Image (spheres, rainbow, N blue to C red):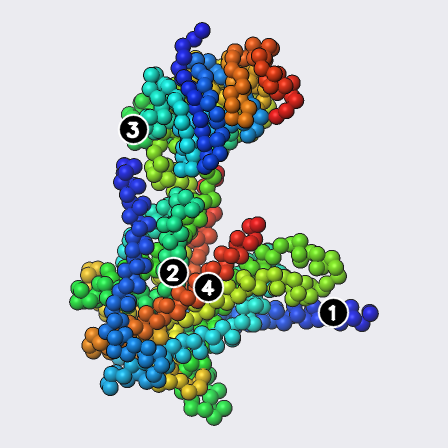
Amino acid sequence: MLGEKTLKIFVFISAASVLLLLFVFASTLLWKSLPSIRVFGYKFLTGTTWDPISESFSALPFLVGTLVTSFLALLISFPFSLAIGVVLGEYFNTGVWSYFFRSLIELLAGIPSVVYGFWGLSFLVPRVRDLQVKFGVMPYGVGIFTSALVLAIMIIPFSALMLREMIYLVPKKYKEAALALGATRFEMIWKVALPYARSGIFAGFMLALGRAMGETMAVTMVIGNSNDFPRSIFSPGNTMSSLVANEFAEVSDNFYLSTIIQVALLLFLVTIFINIISKYITRKLSVRSSL
Amino acid sequence: MKNDIFFRKLQSSFFFLVMLVLSLMVFLPLICILYYVISRGIKAINLDFFTQIPSHVGDSGGGVLNAIMGSFYMVFLSIIIAVPWGLSAGIFLYDAPDDSRFAYLLRLSVDIIQSIPSIVIGIVAYVWFVMPMQKFSALSGSFALAIMMLPMIVRSTEETLRLIPKTLKEASLALGVPHYTTLFKIMIPSGVSGILTGGALSIGRVVGETAPLIFTAFGSPYLVHNILKPMDALPLLIYNCAMSPYESWHTLAWGASLILIFFTLCINLLIKIIVKKWEVVL
Amino acid sequence: MSNKILDIKNLNAFYQNHQILHDVTLNFFSNKATAIMGPSGCGKTTFIRCINRMHELDPKAKVTGEIILHNQNTLDMDSILVRRKIGMVFQRANPFPTMSIYDNVLAGYKLNGIKKSRDEKDEIVQDSLEKAGLWHEVKDFLHRKGTLLSGGQQQRLCIARSLAMKTEILLLDEPTSALDPYATANIEELIEELKKDVTIIIVTHNMSQAARVTDYTAFLYEGKLIEFGETEKLFTVPKHKMTEEYLAGRFG
């Protein structure tokens, strides 16, 4: 049997080492990015080229790639997530069908990223290519739009289930008050439930946005892996995460590695920022609802 | 007036219809993905698939035993790293006083770690393990996966413990049982269902992860039992085969996708069973 | 008069800046039952939680004074050793849900890592359950979960769990407040039996219960000891006006 003292020390060390882990983690990223930061400074965020041969590196195309793909994905997923949230949170919030529906959405959430990528590559890419031929743009098939499409499907479960929770948790007294005043169900949802849950809904979408930004494999497989600055949403590109995944295999020297790690650092900071905002909102909400 | 009510009722029904149609549309991609994975994956599934390693380029057949074993080893190892660690950090959070600054920082760190993109974890694991050891290894991959599991285990442990009535803790303390012994021997066993659920969820989260393994476990076409060597995993194999131009490897990748999804389904089922069967009656 | 077993001198208890107990001084006599009585919020639960050092579990709580057990101030002893000598039973029965009836009785030994042989264990379990009046009801299914018992049985299991540690003093914190009248009567009879082995201190806000089962009664009001004496005398000829009013049901 472990002694009391051993357990106490073990608990403390475990807790402290989680803090230490994060600290060393962030320091590692910063430390390994230093060579690149020293050379490029803020230009790392303003240039438009990433060229390993001439050693001219700027992460802007990928920062833009990440922002465009994830916001586009959010935009595409928005009506669907909202619809699922409303249907599961208000119309079918209990019972067998609701359970079944939710299980299927959980299944969607459980499909590994790499499988989404593979499916995107074999199913979506040819379809998008046909579409591009019709519209008369360069028929790459792969590209920012295709990535956003895959991402949209991937993030729907996260925002939808959170939205469902938020709409479901709108106190019954408000819903019933609205109905008692003669509002139709639509008016009740639109004018009472959704406005009441709006910050929760916002947090749900932020959570999904954070997911989309950090997502790697599915994007890497369908974005086309181009380091040029994307000209349109149909052109191939790279996100910060797909750049790291793709370029890592080609790392030839420490300086090149350092630039890639700096991109990872940038990605780290952006996703943390988004997630902290979302968590902050959720926490404030839970404080409010407990009052 | 009558018209107005009619219009409003119509609007309400129309809204419901639109919401229903939009939400049902989510099943289109789900069905499409499952159709692809099942119809193509089933062709790959046979005895060889589970007992052989991938065949050489161009040859058809072969299996993914190396990836199945690799996934098993790495997930198992990451559980060994993450569970005791996350469990005791969760106990610490449960135990800390409400106004503890340290606990606040720890909760913040757990939130941040949870939101780190998996590819970034992969890069750091590369810097920590692969660079000094100068070789890819299953161990470095497991560590990256363990970092991904950690936040979920910490949080589910803390939340589960908070749901257990305080009287149980007091009963043990009143018997003269020391504080931490009480936490480990009374509180943890009483919360076993919640903690196991958290553990299963975190396994579900990492078993399909590719990104943290690309630069750490790297992948290997051979059956490897040494955790200090490069090792394959199901998601890695899917990635490598999917990106290859060979039709026979694509088939392997679909087969691997099928068993990976099947595995995730099993984990979801397992969670439901755990919640039902292991629920401790308080 | 019997022997003093516990001698409490100038006990003060605090929570944050709030003083809960003010200079409480009284004795407990061995193999007697003493009731701690008073309106809710008078500090009676805090008082017995001080005796087995449970009050200090919260870092914001503080205790001063002396609680002398066998010429030793328990406040200077290791709190864990104190708790092994002074057992406690709570308002709500709280058998350990992961353990069988058998293991629940032995929980104090198991959790403290004290090894016992199979025969010793069987003996302790039977002895403790017999003392708690539960043996005949459960002897055929000792390996079932303790939480499957009825509320009154669970409470007696908790008493057996404390007795198994060979405690000298048993603190009962409103042990019957969550039980039906029949189970309450069972526990009250049990208290009479238990006095042969242990000293009992029982917190109750049920006056008739105090009158029925105890030898001594202490009346607390707003953290101060108002009156202490033999139960019979205190109930029939209270010395203090406040006690009289409380017994007459005028407050509380």
Under circle 3, the secondary element is loop
What separation in Å lies between label 4 and label 2 (alpha carbons)?
11 Å
Depicted A227 relative to depicted C233: above or below: below
Query: For mark 2, does the 10 Å Cα neighbourhood hold few (<14), some (14 to 19), or many (20 or more) residues?
Result: many
Cα–Cα gap, marks 1 and 2? 46 Å
> What's the chain of the residue with tag 3?
C
Q: Which mark is residue B8?
A: 1
Say what amino acid the circle numbered 1 marks. Arg
**Residue at label 4?**
A277
Describe the element under mark 2 as helix, strand or loop.
helix
On the same chain, marks 4 and 1? The answer is: no
Q: Chain of mark 2?
A: B
The quadrant holding residue B65 is bottom left
Mark with earlier residue (1, 2): 1
Q: Residue at x 45, y 17 (%)?
A: C26
Provide the residue designation for mark 2: B112
Instruction: Provide residue B147's location: percent of width, then percent of height.
Output: 32, 59
Q: Which chain hosts label 4?
A: A
Mark 1: secondary structure: helix
Query: Could one spot residue B64 in this view of the protein?
Result: no
Residue at mark 1 shares a chain with residue at mark 2: yes
Residue C58: image tag: none
Cα–Cα gap, marks 4 and 1: 38 Å
Q: Which residue is mark 3?
A: C114
Q: Position of residue A17 (x, y in %)?
A: 29, 52
Q: How many circles with numbers are drawn on the protein?
A: 4
